[in-house]
Amino acid sequence: MRPVAMKPCLPPLRTVTPPSWRAPAGACDCHFHIFGPFDRFPLDPGRGYTPEECLIPAYRTVAEALGIERMVVVQPSVYGTDNGCTLDAAEAFGLDRARAVVVIDGRFGADALAAMARRGARGARFNAVSGNGTPLEQLDALARRIAPLGWHLQLYTHGDTLAELAPRLAALPVPVVVDHMGGVRTAEGLNGRGFQALLRLLESGRAWVKLCGYRISSEGPPYADVAPFARALLAAAPERCVWGTDWPHPSLARDVPDDGALFDLLGEWAPDAATRRRVLVENPAALYGFPAPAAAA
């Protein structure tokens, strides 16, 4: 196999700044990754970056600092279609409070998918940004394959690609969850082609979006330029927005975010308790099949 050029990849911050507000009971982090231990779960040779081990105990520290009680482990590109680490993590957290999003391709049959569903899988991810992912040509075929399971299709792509794919995505037989606020760039403005395509998808009722916003920032920390985009998404479809830390913030060569600061950004985008509860509790329960949340006090 031809050697892969590895991008630099900084580790996560070792401490979390306490946020200015506490998550409501039942809050869910809908997007993070676990890496390792590498002696059990070796990295795929086709990966585009090499992370440090980022293990379950380290993530628990982040979750406790933010008040997170539910979680969705997302398969990262460095593991290709070997979902062992991701599914193992979901089971370790407990399937009463954790789910997984896996990466599959045409080799996965009904029995393999059903086995992953029993281990907490609720969606299949396409990653067209980080490399080492399933080709987008398989979108339609794999969407048909996961539809009987009630799964969704999760997509990470750049804004221009999202705009091109939007008609196909709207016609799929499963819900579509769009990673990282559509992969747009804030410098393109709210009227940019990719962001407008994302808004149309949300307004169609067939799509959800993850408010993991720091990656779309053109200005960098403290990511103030993301706020108009997040507020526009919340205004367009508050019932189909979810949030995630994106811990341990893989493939970054600079400016690794502080998860407490990211949580405070969500608080600024959604300053009222009802919207925060919707994004963190009610919407994840509906999307990932968690037990219905208890009524707010």
Image (cartoon, helix red, strand yellow):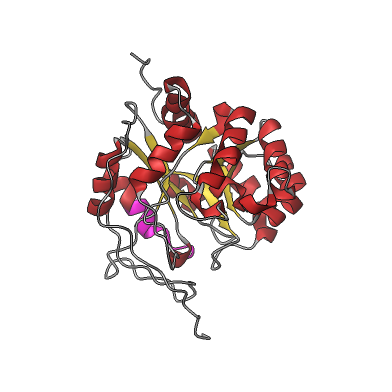
Of residues 233 and 188, the one drawn nearer to the viewer in this rendering:
188
The image position of residue 225, as x and y in percent, is: 56, 46
Q: Which residues are magenta?
A: 80-88
State left or right for residue 146 relative to residue 70: right
For the question of whether residue 184 can be seen, the reply is no
- Could you tell me which residue is drawn at 43 percent across and 33 percent down? 267
Quadrant of the rendering where the C terminus is positioned: top left
- Could you tell me which residue is drawn at 36 percent across and 56 percent down? 248
| In this view, 250 is above or below 192 | below
| Residue 198 found in image quarter | top right
- Could you tell me which residue is drawn at 34 percent across and 26 percent down? 24
Of residues 276 and 129, the one drawn nearer to the viewer in this rendering:
276
| In this view, 131 is above or below 258 | below
Residue 84 lies within the magenta run:
yes
| In this view, 253 is above or below 278 | below
Residue 223 lies within the magenta run:
no
The image position of residue 263, as x and y in percent, is: 39, 40
For the question of whether residue 24 can be seen, the reply is yes
State left or right for residue 44 relative to residue 11: right
| Residue 277 found in image quarter | top left
State left or right for residue 187 relative to residue 40: right
The image position of residue 66, as x and y in percent, is: 30, 38
* Residue furthest to the bottom: 2
